[in-house]
Image (spheres, rainbow, N blue to C red):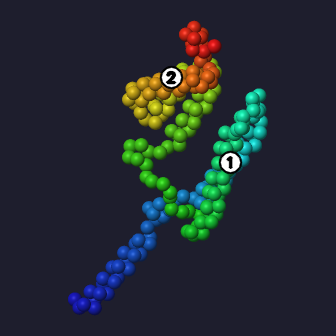
Amino acid sequence: MSEEAKTVKSGTKEDKDQEGELRISPAKLGITMDKRVDLAVAVVVVLLGIFMLITSRNIRLGAIRDPLGTRALPDIVGTFITIIGIVLVVNRIRTWSALPGHFVVEEGKKDEEGHPATWVRAFSIVTAMLLWVLFLNPLGYLVNTILCLAAVALIMGDRSWSKVIVYPIIYTFVTWYVFSQPLQIMLPLGPLTHLARSAGLTP
């Protein structure tokens, strides 16, 4: 085979390889994130921050005035969330034309092997936090927090007794002592109230 024929054959093979690379589906390239959904999520973040700022107006001011006030925390968090949301919205709009169509390259990294990301785990933890708020007074801080932390550990896939039992107990009692004794912040104890009063730990 002549050198010219070899060159033509080699060139044809390279052209086919390039055509094959161009035919790779967007899914294999990771171009599957919908820009419209991403923008909608950023808008929701802005609305969440605005909602916090509006609802914080309903918080009553304390009888004792202080430099920050009872509305300081929701105001700070609401302002921070609103600003971050606006930055995300502007960034999404500014880079809208980076790729044609409504899809862009996925962000983030692949899930850790054996620990796939799932919305069920995230919403389960949110549910556990809401239940902690609902049962804080009936069960008390000690019982309620221990059960909540144990549930979160199980949701995250931890099965060791140290993370499910020992850590929640130690963390709960340490935080309760710090807030209730040196800082004199009264935390509800539920069924343990009488026991704590008899021990002189709470009025």
Q: Which residue is mark 2?
A: 173
* Residue 185 % position (x, y): 62, 24
Residue 1, located in which quarter of the rendered image? bottom left
- Relative height, residue 84 to residue 91 (above, below): above
The number of numbered discs placed on residues in the rendered structure image is 2
Image location of residue 111, percent across then percent down: 43, 49
Q: Residue at x 24, y 90 (%)?
A: 3
| 35 vs 148, nearest the viewer | 148
Q: Quadrant of residue 67?
A: top right
The first of marks 2 and 1 along the sequence is 1
Percent position of residue 24, x then y: 43, 67
* Residue at the (38%, 80%) spot, across then down: 15
Q: Residues within 10 Å of mark 2 (few under 14, many from 20)?
A: some
Is residue 135 visible to the viewer in this orientation of the structure?
no
- The answer to whether residue 162 is visible is yes
Instruction: Residue at 44%, 27% (x, y): give it.
Output: 167
Image quadrant in which the C terminus is located: top right
Residue at which label 1 appears? 79
What amino acid is labelled 2 in the image?
A: Phe
Which residue does the image show at 46% across and 25% down from the upper left?
Answer: 170
Compared with 168, 12 (above or below) is below
Could you tell me residue 147's position as x and y percent? 51, 24
**Disc 1 element:** helix
Q: Is residue 121 above or below residue 191?
A: below
In whole angstroms, how far apart are the C-alphas of marks 2 and 1? Answer: 33 Å
